[in-house]
Amino acid sequence: MVDTFSGDDAVHAAIPRLRRALDSIDLPEDGPTRSFAELAAEVAGMIEHRLQARYVEMAWRLPNLISELARTHADGGHWVRDAATLLTLAFRAADGVAYKFGYLDLSARIIDLMRVSALAAEDPLLVAAVAYVRTETFFATGDLTSASRLLMAAADDLSADLGASASSAAAYGALHMRAAVVAGRAGKPDAAWDHLGEAHRAARQVPEGVYFGTAFGPASVRIHELAVAVELGDSPAAVERAAAWHPPDRLPAERRSHYYIDLARAQLRLGHHQDAYLGLEAARRVAPQHVREHPQVRQTLSALLRTHGSPDDRLLELATWARAR
């Protein structure tokens, strides 16, 4: 069926199947169930697709995977907590599709399911990962106060075990990394930079990597430094920080594309219109499915079009592709 559609149309066409899988999460139909190793490999593949912004593949494979995991979890057995962990990570992949493509009601519902399954998994690091994702709900409603309170409560729960493992340090650092963006968006520079300081402290304890579905490490924190500077309207400083550095290719495509989107926003505010365009083109090369759906990309392109009485063909093509005109 996926071959019938292309691009974002394929994602939108898959959403009804995803909704049906979620509707029956507590009463899954009978069917085959693969081994734990096979299911874990499938979930790992979904995590990789999300990190690399390959949403079409995810959207069509997730409904069946979620139903199969629901059957496994409902069967009980000695690995019920492991099944709950896989189900939580599969929900996170599904949220990646729902949130990026504007299905905010569906995203909020999936996050609630994530919270339930994470508690069943009895893993505090997984619970922290859900708190990180849950911030999306507050971003969507503009409730930055609740977002900050949630992230700090989750970070406080982990603070005593900060040095226990790389995963605990990464979970703690990721929460502060996201809290920095929340504070920046709320116009609180002191809090934002304090949170980034905590994120840097945690990042010194871990290699760059993916922990419970979240990319974290020194390079990820550096990308968030740019995001915070842009949120605070500190564009000259943001460009200065970014000028001598670009995210390494080993980072997930979605995260790298965020860097170029934020760099383009900073360049636009400085009046560097050609550099802003080049930043968006770089983002598109890295993660086209992510960039095409990103509202800040459309905002930046719309602003670039307004500043050019006769925009060149390359800018027009990019704006048309991103549906910004």
Image (cartoon, rainbow, N blue to C red):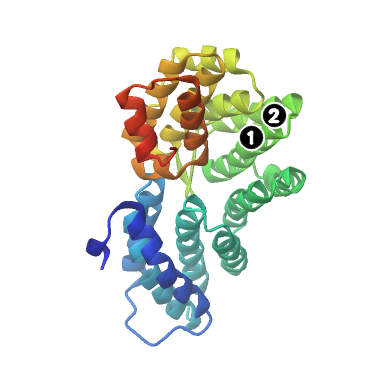
Disc 2 to disc 1: CB gap under 8 Å: yes
Question: Does residue 111 lie above or below 293 as drawn?
Answer: below
Q: Residue at x 59, y 14 (%)?
A: 237
- Quadrant of the rendered structure where residue 274 is? top left
Characterize the local packing of mark 2: few (<14), some (14-19) or many (20 or more) Cα atoms within 10 angstroms: many
Secondary element type, mark 1: helix
**Residue 250 appears in the rendering:** no
- Relative image position of residue 134 (x, y in whole percent): 62, 53
Inspect the image, locate mark 1, and give the three-letter code of the amino acid beneath it: Val
Horizontal arrangement in the rendering, residue 24 relative to residue 318 (left or right): right
The disc label shown at residue 192, or none: 2
Q: Residue at x 37, y 65 (%)?
A: 13
Q: Which residue is mark 1?
A: 181
> Which residue occupies the foreground of this view, 39 or 287?
287
> Which residue occupies the foreground of this view, 247 or 282?
282
In the displayed image of the protein, which residue is found farthest to the left?
3
Work out how far the residue at label 2 is from the one at label 1, CA to CA, in angstroms. Answer: 7 Å
Question: Does residue 151 lie above or below 28 as drawn?
Answer: above
